Amino acid sequence: MQVREAMAKTISIATPRDSLRRIAELMKMEDAGFIPVCEGDNVVGVITDRDIVIRGLSNGQGDIANEPAERFMSRNVATVQADANLEEAAMIMEQREVRRLPVLENGRLAGILSHGNLVQATRSDGPGDKATLGVTRGA
């Protein structure tokens, strides 16, 4: 099965200049802890609820609500191509120890493949099981 068949296609995005308040509002609206950060069509980072807490709040940075995403986002983003198979996506998740992958098609963001999407699509067998071992390492 290809990634495009399992990915979530409706996604919210942020820009590097969007405030953490706006990103938190998107997370609440989407019931998600992960927002891709894009500059035009290019994914330049991702920001997670964990990024906001660990890089911002826990560092005693004070009121960070109006700070831009670029200060707290993760920049070295693992991605997967829409036409890749789920085994490849699982391998990336396992190796990079990530639970979500921006999905690219023709260089543009096309969706998000979450660990949950992968497990549901594979019925927790094969690639789903393999990814679970990687994303839960050290948890």
Image (cartoon, rainbow, N blue to C red):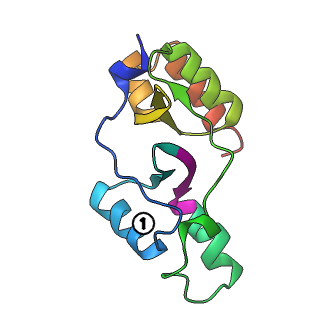
Residue 13 in the figure: left or right of residue 97: left
Up/down of 96 relative to 129, above or below: below
Can residue 112 be seen at all in this image of the molecule? no
Is residue 46 highlighted in magenta? yes
Residue 83 in the figure: left or right of residue 127: left
Can residue 105 be seen at all in this image of the molecule? yes
Up/down of 86 relative to 79, above or below: above
Task: Please state the total of marks drawn on the protein image.
Answer: 1
Badge 1 local density, few (<14 within 10 Å), some, or many (20+)? many
In the image, farthest residue toward the bottom? 62
Is residue 90 or residue 14 the one in the foreground? 14
Which secondary structure type mostly characterizes the magenta part of the structure?
Answer: strand
Q: What quarter of the picture does the N terminus occupy?
A: top left
Residue 116 in the figure: left or right of residue 43: left
Instruction: Check disc 1 and give the amino acid type.
Output: Ile
What residue is drawn where x is 61% and y is 78%?
57
What residue is drawn where x is 47% and y is 74%?
19
The spot of residue 106 in percent (x, y) is 46, 25
Which secondary structure, mark 1?
helix
Q: Which residue is mark 1?
A: 23
Is residue 128 highlighted in magenta? no
The spot of residue 105 in percent (x, y) is 44, 26
Up/down of 135 relative to 83, above or below: below
Is residue 68 or residue 55 the one in the foreground? 68
The spot of residue 67 in percent (x, y) is 55, 78
The spot of residue 119 in percent (x, y) is 43, 25
* Numbered range of the magenta stretch: 43-50
**Quadrant of the rendered image containing residue 53:** bottom right
What residue is drawn where x is 51% and y is 62%?
49
